[in-house]
Amino acid sequence: MTERKPFEAVATLPGSPRWDKLTMRPSQLYSRNDDIRSPFARDYTRILHSMAYRRLKHKTQVFYNIDNDHICTRMEHVAHVESVSGTIAKALGLNTELTKAISIGHDIGHAPFGHKGEEIISGICQKHLGESFWHERNGLRIADKVELLRDNYNISRNLDLTYAVRDGIIAHCGEIDENALKPRDELIDLKDFSAPGKYQPATWEGCVVKISDKIAYVGRDIEDAITLGFHNSEAIDELTHMARANDSEALNTTVIMHNLIIDICENSTPDRGITLSDRFLTQLNSVKSFNYKYIYGNKRFEAFIKYARLVIDQIFDCLMDTYGGERSWENIAALKKYCPTLAGAFENSLAKYCDEGFVPKGELADIARSCQNEKIYGTLSSEKIYAQAIIDYIAGMTDRFAVKCFDELISY
C-alpha cells in the first residue's frame, strides 16, 4: 500500500468538510452544467483569459526595463510562483488546481512601476479616499468588481471567482516574515482584511502560495541584478557565501531555491504547518536581507522613482481636472482631442462601470449595454467616486501604457 502523504487528510479536495464553502462564488452568473473542470480549474482559466493577467507581461517586477527581454516582468514572476507552489502542493498531497488558480491570480492587483508605483498610488489614495492602496486588496477588488469577461452570449460580466481563490489573492502578502504557516479556522468576510497580512489564508494551498511568493522573488531578483550590473565584487562574494551556507557546491540562486523547496516538502506537516527548517529559514532571511541591502535600496532606483511619480501624478491630476458630475463626459471629450489614448481609454472604462442611463448615447452607450456587471461608479455623484475610478484606471495600466499616456500629456 502506498504511504499516505502528510496532508491528504486535510487537503482541499471534493468531499472535505469545507469544500462547499471554499467553492462558493459571490453569485452564479454563468455556470455550465456540462463543464468538466473543477471550480478551481475554472477560476484558473478565467484569470488566464483576463486583461488584468495579460497586462502583467508589461508591468515592472523590480527593475524598470520594459524593452529588455531578459529582465523579469510581473508575469514571469507569477509563472515562477506557480512553478514553486505547484511543486510543493503536489509533494504534500494538496489541491494543485486551487494552488495554480491562486498563483496565477495573486498579483493581478499590482500597479505599474512595481512596488514603487504602488507606494505612489497609495499616497494618492490617502489624499483622496482616506485609505491606503495595497496590491493584495486591489487584487481582490479587480477580481470582484473591475475585471470583466464575456460570457457565451457576448455579455461582459464580473469574474465570479470562488471564495478560496479570492482569499488566496488578498491573503498572499509575502513581505511579512513568518514561518510555519497554517490556515485560519474561520471563513471570514474578505472585507475584514484591513492591512496586508492581517490574516493567514483560509487554505493550506493559500499558505503554500504565500511562502512560494517569497522564494520566487528573492531568487530571481538577484539574477536580474547581476544581469544589470547592480552587484560589485563585495556583493558577489557575499552572495556566494550565502549560496553555500547549506550546499558547498552551490553556484547560483537556482540551487538555493531548489533546496528551499525540498526543505519545505520534508519539514511541513499538518501539525507543524508549511515550514522551513531553522537553517534554511535563516538562509532565506539572509538572502532577503541581501536584496534589501544591495538591490531594493540601491541609489540607481532614484531616477526611476522620480520618473514613476511624475508619470502617475500627472496622469491622475489631468484626469481629476475633468470631473464635473454629468459634465465629466463633456470634459473628457474635450481632453480626448489632445490626448486621445489617455482620455479615450478612460471614458470607455467609465462607460462599463457607470449606470447605463447615465452614459451618453452612441458608442459609449453600446459599451454600457454590453456589460452586465456591478456598476461601481454609479452616476459619478462625488469627487471621491471619480478619484476611485481614476485610481482603478491607473492601477490597471502597464508601464508601457502609462508612459504612452504621459508622453501625450507633455506633447499637447
Image: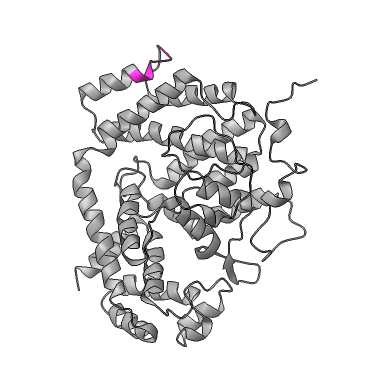
- Does 30 sit above or below residue 17? below
| Dominant SS type (magenta) | loop
- At 56% across and 74% down in the image, what residue appears? 371
Query: What residue is shown at x 59% (from left), y 49% (from top)?
Result: 165
> Which residue is painted at 72% across and 41% down in the image?
13
Number of on-image labels? 0
Which residue is at a point 58% across and 43% down the rendered structure image? 100
Q: Name above or below for residue 331 compared with residue 147.
A: below
**Along the horizontal axis of the image, is 34 left or right of 91?**
right
Q: Quadrant of the N terminus?
A: top right
Q: Report the span colored magenta.
A: 242-248
Q: Quadrant of residue 340?
A: bottom left
Residue 383 placement (x, y as % from top left): 36, 75
The picture places residue 258, in percent across and down from the top left corner, at 48, 24
Q: Residue furthest top?
A: 248
Whether residue 258 sits left or right of residue 344 in the image: it is: right
